[in-house]
Amino acid sequence: MSSPSSPVLARISSGRAVVEGLLDIPPNPAGVVLFAHGSGSSRHSPRNNYVAGVLRKSGTGTLLMDLLTPTEDEDTAARFDIGLLTERLVDAVGWLRNLPSAGRLPLGLFGASTGAAAALEAAAILGPEIGAVVSRGGRPDMARPRSLAQVSAPTLFLVGALDTDVIEMNRQAFERLRCEKKMILIPGATHLFEEPGTLEQVATLAAEWFTGHFSRPAEGRPRPHHP
């Protein structure tokens, strides 16, 4: 288990905008996971912060970021602009790669709601740069079919077993994926995983997915440098 670390406020330029995030990297990290929040959510999301905390305890760094500026977030259309969210995510990956502390670490994407579609679109663009993807109660069906077929990173869908409509949306997207993939229904969970123990299951499964795949070298992906 890693020692506690101190989060750092990140300011990331993307086009004409600057979005903010919280970067927290424990000592000797296995990799870094960038969190893409869903519509109406932010880096302060209690659910994603809980999952991020579990990841850090497992030795994985995290970057929880806002994909929209406060002004943009007031626009409902912007919240569902998957192209814009994807652009911000790709720029955040570029920002991470320029950091001495994270530049050569394996990188993962964790998406919730619309953020899951952006994570998959970004994974399709970045190819082997992305080591693994996890979607929590996501809307992967909002990613383009062509992009889903181009994702090469191992991808895990976590969906509440009682979240009937979203289960079907995930199944449709799941069928289009051509990468290593897995879909798990969390027993007794609804869309927000508010039921006792369900979010803990999500966090544990996500940590296992990321650490398991970060330990496998991916062709073309920068690897950690150990002097």
Image (tube, rainbow, N blue to C red):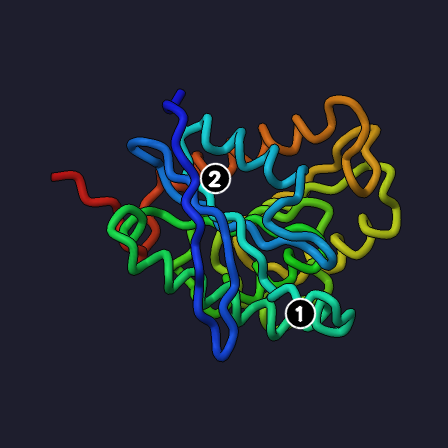
Q: Which residue appears at 48% of the width and 47% of the height?
A: 22
For the N terminus, give its image quadrant: top left
Q: Which residue appears at 61% of the width and 74% of the height?
A: 83
- On the question of residue 181 being in view, the answer is no
The label nearer to you, 1 versus 2, is: 1
Q: Earlier in the sequence, mark 1 or mark 2?
A: 1
- On the question of residue 88 being in view, the answer is yes
Place of residue 226 in the rendered image (x, y in percent of width and height, measured from the top left) = 17, 39
Place of residue 37 in the rendered image (x, y in percent of width and height, measured from the top left) = 63, 53
Q: Which amino acid type is shown beneath numbered disc 2?
A: Phe
Place of residue 164 in the rendered image (x, y in percent of width and height, measured from the top left) = 88, 46
Q: Considering only vertical position in the picture, is 116 above or below 144?
A: above
Q: Which amino acid type is shown beneath numbered disc 1?
A: Thr
The one of 198 and 68 positioned closer to us in this rendering: 68
Which numbered tag is attached to residue 71?
1
Compared across the picture, whether 131 is left or right of 204 comes to left
**Please, what secondary structure does the residue beneath circle 1 have?**
helix
Q: Which residue appears at 53% of the width and 31% of the height?
A: 53
For the C terminus, give its image quadrant: top left
Q: Which residue is mark 2?
A: 210
Compared across the picture, whether 154 is left or right of 38 comes to left
Farthest residue toward the left? 227
Cα–Cα gap, marks 1 and 2: 33 Å
Q: Considering only vertical position in the picture, is 220 above or below 61?
A: below
Compared across the picture, whether 185 is left or right of 100 comes to right
The picture quadrant where one finds residue 60 is: top left
